[in-house]
Amino acid sequence: MNKLQCVITLVVAILFGGAGSVVLAKALPESGDTKEAQRVYEKGAALTMDDLPRSRIQQSLRALQSPARERALQWLNSFTFNERDLDSLNLDRDGGVFYTDKAPAKTKNEVLRHDGFSYVDDTIDVFRLHSKPGSENVLYIDFDGHEIRGTAWNRTGRTLYQAMPFNLDGDGKQFSGAEKANIHEIWRQIAKDFVGYDVDVTTEQPEFFGKTTGHVIITRHIDAHGEPMPYHQTSGVAYVGVWGRYDFAYYSPALVYYDNMPRYAQHIADAAAIKLKRALWHRLPSGQTPRQFSSKNVPASDEFIPSSSIFMPVALLPVAAL
C-alpha cells in the first residue's frame, strides 16, 4: 500500500470510525499487496494496557506507578494513532506522551550543505518572518539557539540544555548567506503547510510562550556544552496534543536535530511541520475559522501542498470539513 493510500485510510478511519471502539483500518490493497491493514486506536476508545500488542510502550506502561500509568492511558486516549506509531510513541516518568522520530540513514562522511540556496534578498530579515502577523496562534521556528530549562525535558534529563543555533559552515559567530537562505526556505515550506489556518508561522521569538504559542527548535543533537540533547539519537522529539493547554510551555519546545538527517531544507521543514502538527493534534481553539495567509513573504502563486508525509490530523482540518 503506498503512502497516499495510507493517508486516505487513516483520515477516513479518524473521521468516520466509531467513537467508542478500537478500529481496524481497512483499505483497498494494491494489486498483489497482501499486507494486513494497520490497526487504528481511536481517540476516546477507552484504550487499556491489554488492548496494546506486546511492545515497548506496553512495557513502559507496566513500569509506571499507578497515577502516572492512568495519566498515560488518558493521554493515549486523547488522540488517534495507528499500530505503526507504537515504535515512535514514548512515555515520560509522569505519564506524558511524546513521539521520537527515527533518524534516517545518512551517507557515509555526509557533510552539511546548503541545498543550492545561497542568497536571500538583503531587505528580508530572516529572523522576523511572519506568515500571518497579528494572529493569536503562533508557531515559532527557532534557528538561533535557546536555553531549555524548567520543562518536561529537564524533568527527565538535565536542568539546562543549551540548544545550538542552525549552522552549516562551522562558524557560530554569524549567519552566512547560505544559512539565511536555508532559514528562509525552511520557514516558507512550513508556512505553506499551515497556509489554510489562522496561524502565524514566524521566525521571530514571541514576547512570551502561552497556551497558543508553539515552539520548535532547529538545532544539533549535541548542545553547546558538548552534552547530548533529549533523545539525541533520533531526528527529533515532540509531546502530543499539548496545544491550548495551560501547561503547553512546560511540554515545549519540540526539537528537530538537523544534523541527524539529510541536510536539505525540505527534510528539515518536513520534520519541523510534523512536530508542530503533533502538538496541535487535538484541535484548534474553539470558534477559530481558517483564513488565508496575508504575508508578502509567501508568494501568492504558491499552491498549498503539504510537505510532510504524515497525514493531517483532525485538529488541523478546515472547519468546513469536520
Image (cartoon, grey):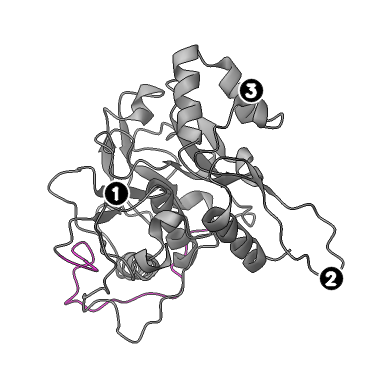
**Which sits in the foreground, 237 or 283?**
283
Relative to 234, 6 lies left or right: right
Residue 229 covered by magenta stretch: no
What kind of element bears circle 2?
loop
At label 1, counting other C-alpha atoms closer than 10 Å, the crowd grade (few under 14, some 14-19, many 20 or more) is many
Specify which label sits upstream in the sequence, 2 or 3.
2
Residue 31: numbered disc = 2
Comparing labels 2 and 3, the label whose residue is closer to the camera: 2
On the question of residue 40 being in view, the answer is: yes
User: Percent position (x, y) of residue 57?
Assistant: 60, 29
- Residue type (three-letter) at the residue carrying disc 3: Gln
Asked if 263 appears above or below 224 in the picture, the reply is below
User: Percent position (x, y) of residue 264?
Assistant: 48, 65
On the question of residue 231 being in view, the answer is: no
What kind of element bears circle 3?
helix
Residue assigned mark 3: 59
**Label 2, label 3: how far apart the Cα atoms are:** 37 Å
**Label 2, label 1: how far apart the Cα atoms are:** 42 Å
- Residue type (three-letter) at the residue carrying disc 1: Gly
User: Percent position (x, y) of residue 88?
Assistant: 58, 40
Residue assigned mark 1: 214
Residues drawn in magenta: 111-133
Who's the residue at 63% across and 57% down the image?
Answer: 107
- Residue type (three-letter) at the residue carrying disc 2: Ser
Specify which label sits upstream in the sequence, 1 or 3.
3
At label 2, counting other C-alpha atoms closer than 10 Å, the crowd grade (few under 14, some 14-19, many 20 or more) is few
Relative to 100, 295 lies left or right: left
